[in-house]
Every structure is written in structure tokens, then in C-alpha cells.
């Protein structure tokens, strides 16, 4: 009697157990199943940053020409002094916001006049700023145990500050095909023979499901 598919699947699932965890580098963790959640080790971003190339300033100062006190590029350390009244900073996308600034104004809405800049469109406090911890707050669980890691998850884990994750070991599956009529891939079948294709399909399906596969070849009938 043939076992119905639903019964066979239920029997397999009832006996299946998670494999032991191991430490896996993020560079090799695609498709792996997390055995432990991933927590953010730091705020992301780690400080308030500009969302575009623009000028950082106080919104209340925007009605007057502002003296440009300097430039801040992505990767620069935050300034060790705050902006003074009626000052602005030339700032670029991803750069840390100087203390004292509460908005950034797109460069398209500003006119540079020598050492000064004039704002042509009144800004709102908070505009075009990514706040510290806006994406991730230190200590939060960003990825839960049991998740199958995809490409976006790897980027998120890296942003959390980790270089490796605890993941379940991949199951190992051996594929053996039987039949005296079978010949391996690339071999011309003789009379009464056929090319063996099942192991190719089964191995691909196992890898797709996250397993490591060992192909054992063909065993003749006995």
C-alpha cells in the first residue's frame, strides 16, 4: 500500500529536529537558519546625519545670510564645536550633523555668496535629517531565531555590528539512484538504457531547501 503524501510528510516532520548550532561568518550565512536572534550592538545611524548634499543650520536663522563655517563630508568626525548663531555648515550626504544645527537645506534652495550662503526657501526644523538610532537602537532584536537569512538580512546583520551569526548546521543529504538501465550524465545510453536524471533534480531541490548534498552515483540492480 502506498503511503499518502500528506501522511509521509507528517511522519517526517514529527521526527525532524533542529540540527546543532554553529558560528557562521556573515559572508557564508546566506540561506542559513538562525539558531539565535541577532541584536543591534550599536545605534544605526550612530549620530544624526544629513540625508543629502546641502547646508546645515538653525531653522530660525534662515532669514539672514549665514557665514559658512566649514564643510563636513561623510566619514568625517563630528565637529568639536557647535554652530554659532547665523552660521551654516556645508554638509554632504551621510555626514554627521554639527551640534546646534536643527535642519538641513537642499543646496538647490541656497545661493552661495563668497563666504556666506543665503537660504531661498524657509526650512522646517528636523528636515532632511536621519536621527541617531532611527533605523536600529542598540539592544533591539533585529532578526529573530528561526529566520532563513536572505540578502537583505545579511546587510541588516552587518549594520547591527556583527560579523557572524549562530545558525543551525545544514542537513546533509546523500542521493543514490538505483537501476541497471541508468547511465550517468554525458554518457551515450546503449540499447535499453536511459540517462539518469533523478539525482540531478533531487540534489537541486535539496540545495534549494538548504541542505548540503552528496551524490553517490548509480547502484545497479541486484
Image: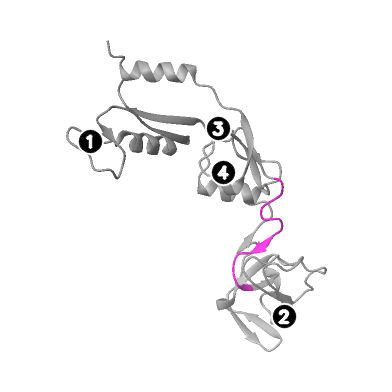
Q: Which mark is residue 194?
A: 1
> Where is the N terminus found, in terms of image quarters?
top left
Number of marks in picture:
4
Q: Secondary structure at mark 3?
A: loop
Residue 85 position in % (x across, y down)? 78, 74
The residue closer to the viewer here, 162 or 17, is 17
Which mark is first along the chain, 4 or 1?
A: 4
In the image, farthest residue toward the left: 191
In this rendering, the label closer to the viewer, 1 or 4: 1
| Magenta segment includes 78 | no
- Upstream in sequence: badge 3 or badge 4: 4
Between marks 3 and 4 in the image, the one whose residue lies nearer the viewer: 4
Foreground tag (3 vs 1): 1
- Which callout, 2 or 1, points to the residue nearer the camera? 1
Counting residues from the N terminus, which is met first, the one under dot 3 or under dot 1? 3
Label 2 and label 1: CA atoms lie apart by: 79 Å
Question: Looking at the image, what colour scheme do you see?
Answer: one colour
Q: Give the mark nearer the N terminus: 3 vs 2.
A: 2
The Cα–Cα distance between marks 2 and 4, rounded to whole angstroms, is 47 Å
- Of the two numbered discs 2 and 4 on the same chain, state the one appearing first in sequence: 4
Would you say residue 37 is visible in this rendering?
no
Q: Which mark is residue 68?
A: 2
Circles 3, 2 touching at the beta carbon (< 8 Å): no
> Mark 2 touching mark 4, by CB under 8 A?
no
Q: Residue furthest right?
A: 80
Amino acid at each position: 500500500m502506498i503511503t499518502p503524501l500528506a501522511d509521509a510528510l507528517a511522519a517526517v516532520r514529527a521526527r525532524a529536529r533542529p540540527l546543532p548550532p554553529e558560528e557562521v561568518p556573515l559572508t557564508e550565512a546566506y540561506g542559513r537558519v538562525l539558531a539565535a536572534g541577532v541584536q543591534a550592538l550599536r545605534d544605526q545611524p550612530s549620530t544624526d546625519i544629513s540625508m543629502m548634499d546641502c547646508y546645515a543650520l538653525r531653522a530660525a536663522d534662515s532669514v539672514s545670510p549665514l557665514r559658512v563655517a566649514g564643510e563636513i563630508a561623510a566619514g568625517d568626525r563630528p565637529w568639536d564645536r557647535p554652530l554659532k548663531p547665523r552660521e551654516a555648515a556645508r554638509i554632504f550626504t551621510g555626514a554627521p550633523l554639527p551640534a546646534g544645527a536643527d535642519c538641513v537645506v537642499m543646496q538647490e534652495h541656497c545661493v552661495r555668496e563668497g563666504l556666506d550662503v543665503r537660504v531661498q526657501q524657509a526650512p522646517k526644523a528636523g528636515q532632511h535629517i536621519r536621527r541617531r538610532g532611527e533605523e536600529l537602537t542598540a539592544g533591539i532584536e533585529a532578526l529573530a531565531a528561526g529566520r532563513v537569512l536572505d540578502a537583505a538580512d545579511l546587510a541588516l546583520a552587518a549594520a547591527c555590528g556583527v560579523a557572524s551569526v549562530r545558525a543551525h548546521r545544514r542537513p546533509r543529504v546523500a542521493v543514490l539512484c538505483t537501476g541497471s538501465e541508468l547511465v550517468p550524465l554525458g554518457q551515450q545510453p546503449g540499447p535499453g538504457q536511459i540517462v539518469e536524471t533523478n539525482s540531478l533534480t533531487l540534489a537541486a531541490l535539496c540545495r534549494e531547501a538548504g541542505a548540503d548534498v552528496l551524490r553517490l552515483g548509480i547502484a545497479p540492480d541486484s
